[in-house]
Amino acid sequence: MKILFITSSFRPQRGGVETHTWEVVQRLIEKGHDVIIITEKLPLHPSPQSRSEVKGFQKTYRLHFGDLGFFKKFRIWFEIFKHRQLIEQADIVHCHDVFFWYLPFRFLYPTKPVYTTFHGYETRFPPTKKAVLIRKLSEKLSWGTIAVGDYIRKWYGAKPDYVMYGAVEQFIDRPHNQQTHKSIPHKPKILLMGRLEKDIGTEMYIETLKILKRDKVPYSLEACGDGSMRKKVEKYGKVHGFVNNINPFIKRADIIFASSYLSILEALSFGKPVVCVYNNPLKEDYLKMSPFAKFAHIENDPQEVALKIEHKHIKIKNLSQLKDFLKSLNWNNITETYLELWQK
């Protein structure tokens, strides 16, 4: 089967959508499918090592859409129109959030099966009427949809065919990881994972670190991520930016700060206690309506988080259930869900 993925960003860029599409693409290829990517050409900041990760994958079309502005959507449609043979040759078109890119072609090729995965939400709260309308239109014009997170039903009125949360390879249960069964050390090693932006709660994590510092509670901080709040985070510890292999950082951490699904799952897969924060009701549902909510510390008060760290109350929850839960969350199952959707 020839499959065309349309996504705003793809490896070597780093992020949840990029990881999700990359993992699914690899498994589709392993199953004998022909996969092509249309994405936007963006400035590359990753290391040469991460670029080599996709060097052998030659079927990625990185199109230049120009700067933001009213006319960008027309440039997007024009550039995709110039590559319309990719749509014509595909058996399946699957959009990752950006169904709007495909909108004119839905009518130009009315019998072409097209599907959409909704990966997240806009950074503004509450969602604008325009954002909700675009989601509803995308769902209406798609042959089927997947939602990453059940909160999308509530906040966008969506009716997805499937709901998923991402995946991890395995549960890591090794001798170096036995802190899940003992107290947090006197000077805990904290790891902050993900984009350093306001919408994922970075401000609240910074406020927690500020309180710990003020109260002379010992800790050390490393951050694996990047964003507009990087300099503020650097006041409290070492920021490494996005890294190719985060596993060594997770292994040596005692507490993980993470508020996005894949980061949370990665931390939990190593048996690490995770602190997730929310700063609005949508983000609260994003976290609390997820199936792994019972394994994490979900908070909206930096003072409360600081107190729990000071008094060594941050421990992983329901460890015995976590292993079985994570076994079901693997990329092979995610890929099979895509195939089931396309065959319905």
Image (cartoon, rainbow, N blue to C red):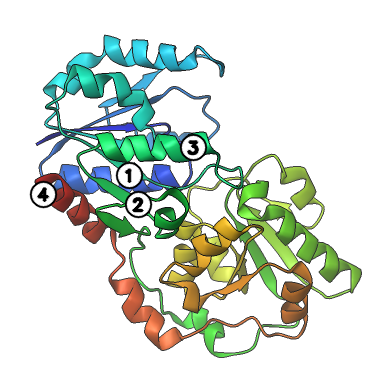
Whether tag 1 and tag 2 are in contact, CB under 8 A, the answer is yes
Please name the residue that numbered disc 2 is placed on.
Answer: 147
Query: Mark 1 vs mark 2: which is more N-terminal?
Result: 1
Q: Nearer the viewer, residue 119 or 210?
A: 119
Please name the residue that numbered disc 4 is placed on.
Answer: 344
Q: Count residues near mark 4 (Cα–Cα under 10 Å), then give few for <14, some for 14-19, many for 20+.
A: few
Asked where in the image residue 254 lies, by quadrant, the reply is: bottom right
Q: Nearer the viewer, residue 88 or 103?
A: 103
Q: Is residue 81 visible?
A: yes
Query: Mark 4 vs mark 3: which is more N-terminal?
Result: 3
Please name the residue that numbered disc 3 is placed on.
Answer: 131
Q: Amino acid at mark 3?
A: Ala
Residue at the spot 83% in from the left edge and 75% down from the top edge: 217
In the rendered image of this protein, does residue 220 appear above or below residue 151?
A: below
Q: Residue 139 at what x, y percent from top left?
A: 31, 40
Residue at the spot 64% in from the left edge and 57% down from the top edge: 280
Q: Residue 56 at what x, y percent from top left?
A: 28, 32
In the rendered image of this protein, does residue 52 appear above or below residue 84?
A: below
Q: Is residue 11 visible?
A: no
Q: Amino acid at mark 2?
A: Ala
Q: Count residues near mark 3 (Cα–Cα under 10 Å), then give few for <14, some for 14-19, many for 20+.
A: some
The quarter of the picture where the N terminus appears is top left
